[in-house]
Image (spheres, rainbow, N blue to C red):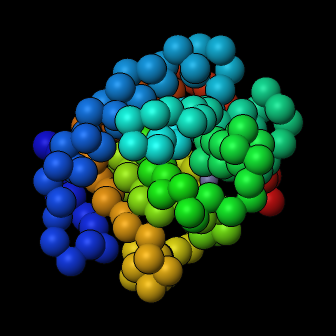
């Protein structure tokens, strides 16, 4: 069963949510192709309204870079494309197949992205894959203070299937060995 929607908005905007469900479903369906090409099991897209600005998967393993998460890759592509380190005036939306990790929450905060929509929550990602998503105390409330809207737990069933398949196919669970 899909997990209940979580948000920092005072009231759920059903139009926005319906739109996010559509985009995140599309991203989840595309994700297995990226995984087959060696990407990590996460995909992020940045939109301005209906216009796609950037779409990137996690490339930690193929790039040998621990910070090449999908969200950071997408922010980098969008900022280069728009020639602007500050995306705040452009009113951009980010859609992610999973809840951002502690590093990506920081990257989103610095980018100026206004709305964040994510699929599966970190707790479930950790349970299925063994990735450690980091500590994130009250990040939805902290984002609210910054004027960043967040909706999460969108179509979690779909994400769980993709992650379970990732693990079952014995793809790399990349992380520091400690
Ligand atoms: Zn991340």
Name the residue nearer the viewer: 54 or 155. 54
Which residue occupies 31% across, 31% down?
25
Residue 133 seen by the camera: no
Residue extending farthest to the front is 89
Residue 140: horizontal and vertical position, in percent? 40, 74
Quadrant of the image occupied by residue 29: top left
Residue 75 visible somewhere in the drawing? yes
Quarter of image, res 57: top right
Name the quadrant of the N terminus: top left
Up/down of 176 relative to 129, above or below: below
112 left or right of 126 in image: right
Q: Is residue 69 left or right of residue 100?
A: right
Instruction: Looking at the picture, tell me which residue is in the foreground, 123 or 97.
Output: 97
Residue at figure coordinates x 59%, y 14% from the top left? 36
Q: Using the image as rendered, state which of residue 101 and residue 89 is in the foreground.
A: 89
Left or right position of 151 against 145: left
Q: Position of residue 113 (x, y in %)?
A: 54, 60
Residue 141 placed where, x, y %? 39, 82
**Quadrant of the frame with the C terminus:** bottom right
Q: How many marks?
A: 0
Q: Residue at x 74, y 58 (%)?
A: 85
Q: Residue at x 42, y 29 (%)?
A: 27
| Residue 71, percent from left and from top | 60, 48
């Amino acid at each position: 069963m899909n997990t209940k929607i979580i948000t920092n908005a005072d009231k759920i905007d059903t139009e926005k949510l319906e739109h996010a469900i559509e985009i995140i479903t599309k991203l989840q369906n595309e994700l297995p192709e990226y995984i087959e090409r060696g990407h990590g099991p996460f995909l992020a897209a940045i939109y301005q309204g209906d216009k796609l600005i950037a779409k990137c998967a996690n490339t930690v393993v193929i790039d040998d870079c621990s910070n090449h998460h999908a969200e950071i890759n997408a922010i980098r592509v969008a900022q280069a494309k728009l020639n602007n380190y500050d995306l705040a005036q452009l009113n951009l939306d980010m859609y992610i197949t999973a809840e951002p990790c502690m590093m990506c929450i920081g990257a989103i905060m610095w980018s100026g992205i206004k709305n964040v929509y994510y699929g599966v929550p970190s707790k479930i990602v950790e349970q299925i894959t063994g990735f450690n998503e980091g500590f994130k105390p009250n990040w939805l409330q902290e984002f609210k203070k910054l004027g960043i809207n967040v909706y999460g737990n969108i179509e979690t069933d779909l994400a769980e299937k993709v992650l379970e398949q990732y693990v079952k196919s014995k793809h790399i669970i990349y992380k520091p060995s400690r």
